[in-house]
Every structure is written in structure tokens, then in C-alpha cells.
Image: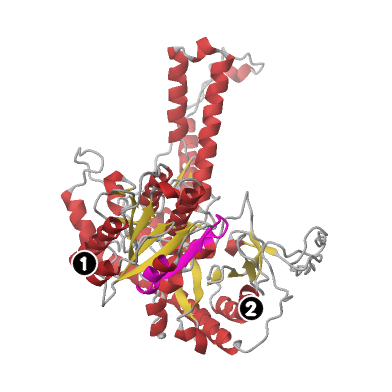
């Protein structure tokens, strides 16, 4: 390697006529040789300084042994995979220890009495030293009409930790988050909180053995989540978090499933019953993950899909499809009378088609029937389509406070290995809907020994999808308000072509100037596995204690992907088993500092584009072939 050094020395000679001089020798000429000597000496000095500062010789020597060596992309990918495999194995080992400990602790707690006043670190109520404790509200009465006894929150010391995104934490304890719809002093909940507190020693051992571990947690089937290290829960602006509706819990708690939801749209469902039915459907959809396939049919005289373009199919339960199904439910209206026979036949035939063609989830199948009552048991239909092997479970949701008879709709669920629920108010919908999850998990729990390990798609920690939708609505309202106020202020000027052009250019510039990174969101993937209830009575009915897991920040995986080995134009990416991007340089989940509606359901062929002048979503055959070979 040759080094090129260019030294430029300029000497400006000022004519003696420019500045008057008192020196009589000012008119003497400076000799050429003298100036040449100065320039040469200065050049040599600058050369040595540059040589010393740049360490030129050292750099030249280092390249004497340089060689151009071809690299195998397959070998580099294999090295990356090994590094990431070691990371994932260490996380799986940590989760297995949490799972084993939880099952044993629940087993040893079986015959102990529960203390209803047991104090624990409640993530929403615990206080730090110096904070004033809460006082009892005399208006809060118990079931006997007496003032409720206030159980004082526990005190804890929290310090910011850069490993946990500078959140104030305590690495000696775990804290418990209880959803707003769960009463933490019910016997079932407080007993699980009490025995699970012993998991703190396992959390600490895991963290001490591997300080790179992120959040560890145990999500209980009763609703609460125990998280390590302890930290205060942020309720901004409201707390919608329920661990049982998060992807890591849903995917670990039961196997992939095909679900057909049948919604009664007859005239008797008008009013509050229709509102409750819509709420039931929305909550069922919230419990589905990307490994599940679903469709919704409304039935009156005729049976129709809620979303017309989802005709005669089951769609993957990703965020985009779930959003479309929810929007379709909002536009649903009641009419005429219910044809339950046609609805059940349509559902059974669709599920049978997917079962025979081995498409969809290729695992569990279920029909969710939501109605205010059925006139018959429809036993002949079940004998023809479902008995004796019962590949399809039937779950029935009876809507309405005043119903004539529950025997038929209850019989349908019980005789087809399902679950029956009677719903009369909106408040009880979520808890009752969640009861289907342990029923679907029964084959898994009865196996006892096999604990499947799942990895979730990428998601933003602690951010509920409903909050993202709400943030987009707030932003749209603000933009509409600004346009309305500008028009109201000066109608004529607002509608001038120059003003409209200026607004358009400002909008384009604002959209293009958005940052793709934000410290507001912490992107994760989670490894999780189910925790079974091995107590004697619980085993007979196949209870699920909950799900154990730990988060893996996406940035920790990116560090192992060795971008320096790939060259200027090379990059590595990771996709899930469904083809959704987990890590990719062109994955941009944030727009205008808000998460995009389907940020974690971006297919790899949406970002791996070819310059072939095709229309949007008209994918190149080579891309599709590459995707099929990966997934």
C-alpha cells in the first residue's frame, strides 16, 4: 500500500509599496535560496509531524500481509446462528428453572391455609421510603356493610438500572401486577400470589448467574403477573395490561388452533344482547396469536362472513386481520330469525376442509357459538360431523339476563368437549371468555412431561395494541382540529392553491423527516413455556398454573449478527416461523413517534423487494420461492 502525502506551503510576499517602512534596508530583495531553504525546512518538519500523528509506517506494515480471501455467506450465517443459539439456550434454561420451581411450589402449598391479609409488593401500590402511605376510604364497605380494612402497601427501595432501560428497580425482589378487572384479595388469587413469592430466590439466582438476563416473570392463570426485578407499574394514561392477553402467554398456554366464531344476528339479539355479543367476539379475538386461524360468520336466515373478502376461508390471526374482523363486527346488524342448522353446517364443513387439506393451524379446532338460545340440541349434526372422534370442540356463550332455557346450548358444549358460559353483563365478559384457554390446553396439561418452548414475534414492551390505535385516533383528531381552525380563521386564504400546496409540501416533509428509532419503545421477543398444576385434584381436570418467561431485547440479538463480516452491501435478518420479520434493517415499526398498526406482522417479502418495476404486492417469483424455502 502506498501512502500519498501532499504538503502545501505558501509564502505570500507583500510588496514594499503596500506598507511604509522606516527601515532603510526595506528595499533590499530577499534571496531565492533563503526562501527555498525555509520552505524545505518547514516541509520536512510538517512531514515528520504528519508521519508521527498518522503512524503511516505502522499502517503500511500492517497491510503487507493483507490478502483477499473469499468468504462463504453460508458459513457466516452458520456462525451467527450458533451465537444466537447459545443466547437462546441460556434464556431457555432460565425459564425452565422458573417453571420447575413454580410447579413444585404450588405442589408443596396444596394443604396450607391462605392468609387473606397477606402483604406483597404490589407494582401499583408499593411505596418508596419517604412516601406517604394511603389512607382508608370510609365509603369503601365490605360485604357485611362494614368499612373495608386497609392493608398497608409494602415499602421498597428502587434505583435506576441502565440494564433495565434506566427504570427504577430492586433486584432483590419481584413485584406483582394485577389487572384492573381482577380482585387481588380473592382466595384463588391471593393464594397464588403467596406461594409464587418464593420464586424470588430463583429469579435472583438466574440473574446472578447471568447478569445479561432481562425481565423474568410468571403469568398466573388467575390474572396477575409476577415480574423480576421489582418496579413500579406505569399507568399512563390507563392500565389495560392483562398478561393472559399477551402473545407470550397465549402461545405458550395452548396449541395452535382453527376457530370459527358463529354470531347470532337474529332479531332477538337486538340492543344490549348485540352489544354483549360484540364484546365477547372482541375478547375472543384478543386471545388469538399468529399461530391461530379464524373467521367470523353471522347467521340469521342466511349465513354470511363478517368480512366479505374472507369468504370461505380462515385467516391468520395477525394484527391486521384481527383489526378487519373487529371493524366488521361493528358494522353488524340484527334481522329476522336464526338458522342455527345452516351456521353449524357451514362451520363444520369449513373446518373439515382445512383438516383434510392439512392447512391452517393443523392442530386444535373449535367452534364458538354466541347466541341468546337455541331451540334444539342438533344431535344429528354432531353425530354426522363430530362424533365419535370429536376433532372440533364446541364453546357456547349464552347472552342475556332473561333466557327461556339453557339446557340445549349447555348440552352442545358439554357433549363436544367444550365449555358453556352464561353472560348477562359487559363487566363479566373478559373473565368468562378467558375460561376457554385452559380447556383448549387440557391435552397439553394431561401430557404432564412435555413443556413446549415458544418464541414470540417482536413487540414493544408494555405497549398494548389498543393504546396504539387510540394514539393514532388522537393524532388524527388533532390534525383535523388544526385544519378546521385554520379554515375558520381565514376561509379564503385556506382554500388558495398556494396554501394547499404549502400544506401538502409540509406534510410530505414532516413524514419524510421521521426518525426510525425511538427511545420511547423497547422492542422484545419473549421465550416462554407453560406451567402445569401437578396437584392431585388439579391434574384430574388438567389445570394450567400459568406461563413462565423472560424477555430478550432485540438489541441483544443484533449484537450477535456480526455486520462487520458482511461487507458494505450485506446484511442479516431473522424471521419467525410465520415469515414475519423479527430483525431486519428495513423494518421500521415507528412512524411519527407512534407504533404502526401492524408493526409486528410484517412479512419478509414486504421488505425484501426487487427492482423489477412490479406493482405493490405483486411479488417476484424468486422472492416467494425464497420465502417458502425459509418458512
Tell me which segment is drawn in magenta.
Answer: 409-430
Residue 52 image offset from top left, x and y in percent: 48, 52
Q: Residue at x 52, y 30 (%)?
A: 479
Q: Residue at x 45, y 14 (%)?
A: 498
Answer with the quarter of the image where residue 285 lies.
bottom left
- Which structural element holds mark 2? helix
Query: Mark 2 or 1 closer to N-term?
Result: 2
Query: Residue 544 in magenta?
Result: no
**Which residue lies under the disc numbered 2?**
191
Asked if residue 69 can be seen in this view, the reply is no
Answer with the quarter of the image where residue 294 lies.
bottom left
**Which residue lies under the disc numbered 1?**
358
- Which structural element holds mark 1? loop
Distance of label 2 from label 1 (alpha carbons): 43 Å
Asked if residue 31 can be seen in this view, the reply is yes
Residue 612 image offset from top left, x and y in percent: 19, 41
Q: Nearer the viewer, residue 57 or 623?
A: 623
Q: Residue at x 36, y 74 (%)?
A: 415
Answer with the quarter of the image where residue 241 lies.
bottom right
Query: Residue 415 in magenta?
Result: yes
Amino acid at each position: 500500500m502506498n501512502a500519498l502525502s501532499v504538503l502545501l506551503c505558501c509564502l505570500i510576499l507583500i510588496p514594499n509599496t503596500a506598507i511604509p517602512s522606516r527601515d532603510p534596508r526595506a528595499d533590499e530583495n530577499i534571496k531565492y535560496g533563503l526562501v527555498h531553504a525555509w520552505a524545505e525546512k518547514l516541509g520536512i518538519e510538517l512531514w515528520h509531524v504528519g508521519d508521527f500523528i498518522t503512524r503511516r509506517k505502522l499502517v503500511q506494515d500492517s497491510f503487507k500481509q493483507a490478502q483477499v480471501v473469499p468468504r462463504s455467506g453460508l458459513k457466516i450465517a452458520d456462525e451467527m446462528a450458533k451465537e444466537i443459539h447459545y443466547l437462546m439456550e441460556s434464556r431457555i434454561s432460565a425459564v425452565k428453572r422458573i417453571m420447575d420451581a413454580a410447579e413444585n411450589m404450588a405442589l408443596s402449598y396444596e394443604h396450607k391455609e391462605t392468609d387473606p391479609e397477606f402483604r406483597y409488593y404490589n407494582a401499583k401500590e408499593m411505596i418508596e421510603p419517604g412516601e406517604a402511605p394511603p389512607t382508608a376510604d370510609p365509603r369503601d364497605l365490605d360485604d357485611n356493610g362494614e368499612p373495608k380494612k386497609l392493608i398497608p402497601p409494602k415499602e421498597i427501595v428502587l434505583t435506576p438500572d441502565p440494564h433495565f432501560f434506566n427504570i427504577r428497580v430492586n433486584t432483590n425482589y419481584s413485584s406483582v401486577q394485577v389487572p384492573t378487572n381482577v380482585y387481588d384479595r380473592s382466595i384463588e388469587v391471593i393464594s397464588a400470589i403467596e406461594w409464587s413469592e418464593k420464586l424470588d430466590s430463583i429469579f435472583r439466582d438466574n440473574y446472578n448467574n447471568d447478569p445479561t438476563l432481562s425481565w423474568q416473570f410468571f403469568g398466573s392463570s388467575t390474572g396477575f403477573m409476577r415480574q423480576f426485578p421489582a418496579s413500579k407499574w406505569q399507568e399512563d394514561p390507563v392500565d389495560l395490561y392483562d398478561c393472559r392477553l399477551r402473545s407470550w402467554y397465549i402461545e405458550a398456554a395452548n396449541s395452535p388452533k382453527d376457530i370459527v366464531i358463529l354470531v347470532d344476528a337474529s332479531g332477538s339479539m337486538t340492543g344490549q344482547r348485540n352489544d354483549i355479543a360484540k364484546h365477547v367476539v372482541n375478547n375472543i379475538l384478543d386471545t388469538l396469536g399468529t399461530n391461530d386461524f379464524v373467521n367470523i360468520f353471522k347467521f340469521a336466515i342466511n349465513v354470511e362472513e363478517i368480512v366479505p373478502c374472507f369468504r370461505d376461508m380462515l385467516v391468520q390471526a395477525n394484527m391486521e386481520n384481527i383489526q378487519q374482523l373487529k371493524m366488521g363486527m361493528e358494522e353488524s346488524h340484527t334481522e329476522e330469525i336464526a338458522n342455527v342448522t345452516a351456521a353449524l353446517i357451514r362451520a363444520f364443513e369449513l373446518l373439515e376442509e382445512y383438516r383434510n387439506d392439512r392447512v391452517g393451524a393443523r392442530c386444535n379446532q373449535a367452534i364458538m357459538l354466541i347466541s341468546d338460545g337455541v331451540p334444539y340440541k342438533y344431535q344429528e349434526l354432531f353425530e354426522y360431523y363430530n362424533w365419535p372422534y370429536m376433532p372440533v370442540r364446541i364453546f357456547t356463550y349464552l347472552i342475556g339476563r332473561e333466557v327461556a332455557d339453557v339446557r340445549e346450548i349447555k348440552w352442545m358444549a358439554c357433549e363436544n368437549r367444550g365449555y358453556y358460559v352464561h353472560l348477562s353483563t359487559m363487566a363479566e365478559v373478559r373473565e368468562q371468555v378467558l375460561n376457554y384457554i385452559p380447556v383448549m390446553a387440557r391435552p397439553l396439561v394431561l401430557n404432564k412431561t412435555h413443556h413446549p418452548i415458544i418464541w414470540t414475534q417482536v413487540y414493544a414492551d408494555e405497549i398494548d395494541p389498543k393504546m396504539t390505535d387510540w394514539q393514532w385516533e388522537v393524532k388524527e383528531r388533532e390534525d383535523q382540529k388544526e385544519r378546521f381552525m385554520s379554515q375558520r380563521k381565514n376561509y379564503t386564504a385556506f382554500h388558495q392553491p398556494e396554501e394547499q400546496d404549502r400544506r401538502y409540501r409540509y406534510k410530505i416533509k414532516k413524514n419524510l423527516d421521521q426518525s426510525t428509532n425511538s427511545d420511547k419503545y423497547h422492542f422484545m421477543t419473549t421465550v416462554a413455556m407453560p406451567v402445569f398444576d401437578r396437584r392431585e385434584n388439579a391434574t384430574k381436570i388438567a389445570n394450567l398454573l400459568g406461563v413462565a418467561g423472560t424477555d430478550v431485547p432485540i438489541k441483544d440479538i443484533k449484537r450477535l449478527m456480526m455486520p462487520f463480516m458482511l461487507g458494505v452491501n450485506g446484511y442479516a435478518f431473522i424471521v419467525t416461523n410465520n415469515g414475519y420479520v423479527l430483525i431486519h434493517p428495513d423494518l421500521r415499526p415507528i412512524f411519527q413517534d407512534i407504533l404502526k398498526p401492524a408493526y409486528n406482522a410484517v412479512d419478509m417479502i414486504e421488505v425484501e423487494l426487487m427492482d423489477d418495476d412490479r406493482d405493490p404486492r405483486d411479488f417476484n417469483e424468486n422472492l416467494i420461492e425464497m420465502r417458502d424455502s425459509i418458512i
